[in-house]
């Protein structure tokens, strides 16, 4: 079987180290939480080889690259409709999964944020994610309030998931090697799926706060708050980067109460 040619525009850097592949697959923790796993960007199947040996869950593969798809179709003829040739970002999860499921992948780095926002949009169904990102993105997911990496993605992910930075991966274990270090993270969805506040407003507050992160929240959120009623609220004198997830929930509730 001839190998798949690495295409830069699809973020194709193929992992060559089977021990790391196994370590990534073993980071999934199905227990009784899910019985279906979706691998994003299987490429030539270094993770899929291990995923498909598992009996605790059924594995689905989705790759946008037709050459990868044809390669995998020959390699795993038994998969049939569980091997999908399509864009993950366009995928309608409900047409394939009717129960909570997990996502795994050595993700294409050019669409990292879009993958994570798709997970967030589908948080009712996506109960766990194990994935490789460029190290900087992995650090942003896990960043704490006050650090320079802390931003919109950190707050939203940490609001709904427990985020764990599992391990760093050197560039030399990929072919071709990327220019950056990589890291594997795990997201485990919180048992309470809803936040204790008006979630639509919470999203607006976080986005508006970080979109003008140099301003105090009083200024950055001026279109969302009742300025007079909240004149004495000292949380608004801070910048978004100082607020923990719990603070953002508290602030959202104060804005609601003062409208
Ligand atoms: C970093 S490579 C990883 C390949 C393989 N899993 C490995 O570890 O060697 C990323 C993979 O994602 C695929 N990909 C890129 N964009 C995609 C998208 N929008 N939807 C699905 N797959 C995508 C690429 O074709 C490639 O196979």
Image (cartoon, grey):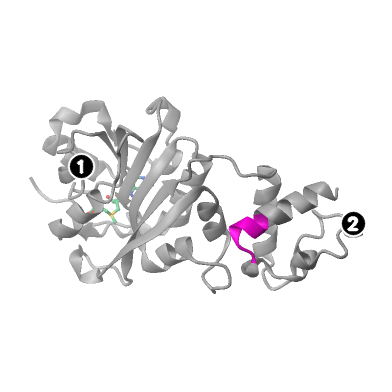
Q: Residues within 10 Å of mark 2 (few under 14, many from 20)?
A: few
**Disc 2 secondary structure class:** loop
Residue range corresponding to the magenta coloring:
243-248
Residue 259 as seen in the image, left or right of residue 185: right
Instruction: Say whether residue 206 is visible.
Output: no
Q: Nearer the viewer, residue 133 or 198?
A: 198
Q: Secondary structure at mark 1?
A: helix
Write down the quadrant of residue 214 in the picture.
bottom right
Ligand 1 within 8 Å of disc 1? The answer is: no
- Let me know if residue 151 appears in the view: yes
Residue drawn at x 31%, y 33% is 36
Judge from the rendering whether residue 175 lies leftward or rightward of residue 257; answer left or right. left
Q: Residue at x 31, y 70 (%)?
A: 181
The residue at the far right in this view is 228
Residue 123 in the magenta stretch? The answer is: no
- C-beta proximity under 8 Å, tags 2 and 1: no
Badge 1 crowding class, 10 Å Cα cut-off, few under 14, some 14 to 19, many 20 or more, is many
The residue where tag 2 is placed is: 229
Q: Is residue 111 above or below residue 93?
A: below
Q: Which mark is residue 51?
A: 1
Q: At which x and y percent is residue 235? A: 75, 65
Q: Is residue 108 above or below residue 40?
A: below
The one nearer the camera, 43 or 140, is: 140
Report the residue at 14% width, 56% height from top. 18
Q: Is residue 95 above or below residue 157?
A: above
């Amino acid at each position: 079987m001839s190998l798949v040619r690495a295409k830069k525009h699809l973020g194709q850097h193929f992992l060559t180290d089977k021990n790391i592949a196994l370590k990534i697959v073993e980071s999934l923790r199905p227990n009784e939480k899910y019985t279906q796993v979706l691998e994003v960007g299987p490429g030539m199947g270094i993770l899929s080889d291990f995923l498909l040996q598992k009996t605790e869950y059924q594995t689905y593969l989705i790759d946008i690259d037709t050459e990868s798809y044809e390669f995998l179709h020959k390699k795993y003829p038994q998969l049939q409709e569980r091997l999908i040739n399509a864009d993950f970002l366009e995928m309608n999860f409900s047409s394939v999964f009717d129960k909570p499921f997990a996502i795994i992948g050595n993700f294409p780095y050019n669409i990292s944020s879009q993958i994570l926002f798709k997970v967030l949009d589908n948080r009712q169904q996506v109960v766990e994610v194990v994935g490789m990102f460029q190290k900087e993105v992995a650090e942003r997911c896990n960043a704490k309030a006050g650090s320079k990496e802390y931003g919109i993605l950190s707050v939203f992910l940490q609001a709904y998931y427990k985020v764990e930075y599992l391990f760093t991966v050197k560039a030399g274990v990929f072919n071709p090697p990327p220019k950056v270090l990589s890291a594997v993270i795990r997201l485990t969805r919180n048992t309470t799926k809803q936040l204790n506040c008006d979630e639509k407003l919470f999203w607006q507050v976080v986005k508006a706060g970080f979109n003008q992160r140099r301003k105090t929240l009083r200024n950055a959120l001026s279109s969302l708050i009742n300025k007079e009623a909240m004149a004495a609220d000292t949380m608004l004198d801070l910048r978004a980067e100082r607020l923990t997830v719990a603070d953002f929930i508290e602030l959202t509730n104060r804005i609601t109460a003062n409208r």
